[in-house]
Image: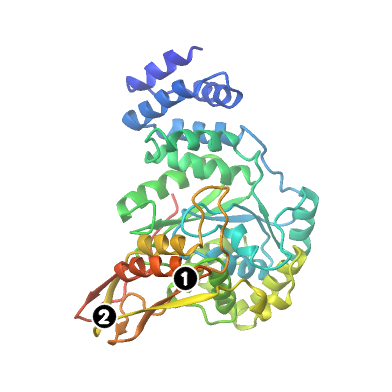
Amino acid sequence: MLTCDLIKKKKEGFPLTTEEITYLISGYVTGAIPDYQMSALLMAICFRGMNQEETLALTLAMRDSGEVLDLSGISGSKVDKHSTGGVGDKTSLVLAPMVAALGIPVAKMSGRGLGHTGGTIDKLECFPGFSCTLSGEQFTENVNRIQMAIMEQTNNLAPADKKLYALRDVTATVDQVSLIASSIMSKKLAAGADAIVLDVKCGNGAFMKNEENAGTLANEMVRIGRGAGKETVAVITDMDQPLGNAVGNALEVKEAILALNGFGPADLMEVVYALGVQMVVLGGRAKSLTEAESHLKEVIANKSALYKFAEFVEAQGGKAADVFNPVHLPTATYTLEVKQRESVYVRRILAEEIGRASLIAGAGRLTKESTIDLGAGILLHKKRGNYVRDGESLATIYANDLEKAKEAYGKVLGAYEFSGEEQKEQPMVKKIVTG
């Protein structure tokens, strides 16, 4: 095969075969195909698209470009969950111990965050001593013993995706649905789960800004998962305002602990239960979504999910006591109240702007080498639909640099949109995609 011929084929709108796609991905990973040729191919894909067979072939070639985890040593049906990302999204911290408390193994690989806050790994490292660096044997042993372990994503997991994404980022070829779906699903499939539940965000704070585009991506990923032999369900959820009240690493961990104690914000828990019922059914612990929801509510009420989270933290180097009394989690030196100057209803909170404000405060990182401030962030006191009186606090900014807090102030205030009229409640769950 000649790479130039395959670029021309795609440029002219013809589909590539599985063998041709495998050749291209393999050649790019080994260095036989240079960046300039792969850039041309990616641009041709952006203009011409890929059919379902091509998208599945691309995903599997990317999955097989590195290590594919073998979870056969873990008893039970392994169900993984993935979010396409948003502001204040601490869902995994609440959901994983709930599912594990029902005896469903949670063997999860997660990453660090780039952007407004850290990823799941960064958040968990708020617990002093906690480590996500586990050997394969320890990972398996922890899941078999306590039904839950989370480890940092290895460098050899879908290396083709890392290399391709870096190239897409600098060649304006990120926003193509087949490329987005294959990027996400190649990593999920390489992680070895038996079934996958996807949380596809839509709205101002999400990559997909509207429900139609989120639905297109959700359908594509579900087709890929099922085409690869995995039970896959996608839940499209709202990200037009931050999820929950906390944005920032330690702040989000504390909110997750509140949720496990039964005091989680309503919007967060709506998303948690919507994803959780799918995981419980796919994990074989319930025959219906109604039965699954009943089980999930029970592990919150009897505190078994909270105790499972504490057991998990201790198993990975932290202290269970810090779950029950999180006083040792990072805290910020300075707080700054953002106050409202008239009595109105909150119509909307631009999640993307709150995310940028948290980044300014120090809660995120712009590059992998950036230092993240685990204590920084924003705590929202008023959400969509709430009535705010003149002088009431909209939010509190947490920072270890007062100048950064002051800089974030304008972003937070500007993120709020108001109305003189009472606002209707909006559902967090937009649609369930089962294929």
- The image's colouring method is rainbow
Residue 412 coordinates in the image, percent (x, y): 36, 69
- Left or right: residue 338 versus residue 321 is left
Q: Is residue 229 visible?
A: no
Q: Which residue is mark 2?
A: 345
Q: Which mark is residue 402?
A: 1
Residue drawn 37% across the image and 36% down it: 172
The picture places residue 384, in percent across and down from the top left corner, at: 32, 75
In primary-sequence order, the first of circles 2 and 1 is 2
- Is residue 429 among what the camera can see? yes
Q: Residue 241: image x %, image y %?
A: 36, 67
Q: Residues within 10 Å of mark 1 (few under 14, many from 20)?
A: some
Q: Nearer the viewer, residue 22 or 422?
A: 422
Callout 2 amino acid: Tyr
User: Circle 2: is it few (<14), some (14-19), or many (20+) Cα within 10 Å?
Assistant: many
Total of numbered circles in the picture?
2
Element type at marker 1?
helix
Q: From what the image shows, is residue 393 above or below residue 200?
A: below
The part of the image, by quadrant, that contains residue 189 is top right
Structural distance between the alpha carbons of marks 2 and 1: 29 Å
* Residue furthest to the front: 403
Q: Is residue 222 above or below residue 166?
A: below
Q: Amino acid at mark 1?
A: Leu
Locate residue 343 relative to residue 83 in the image: left or right.
Answer: left
Residue found at the very far left of the displayed protein: 420
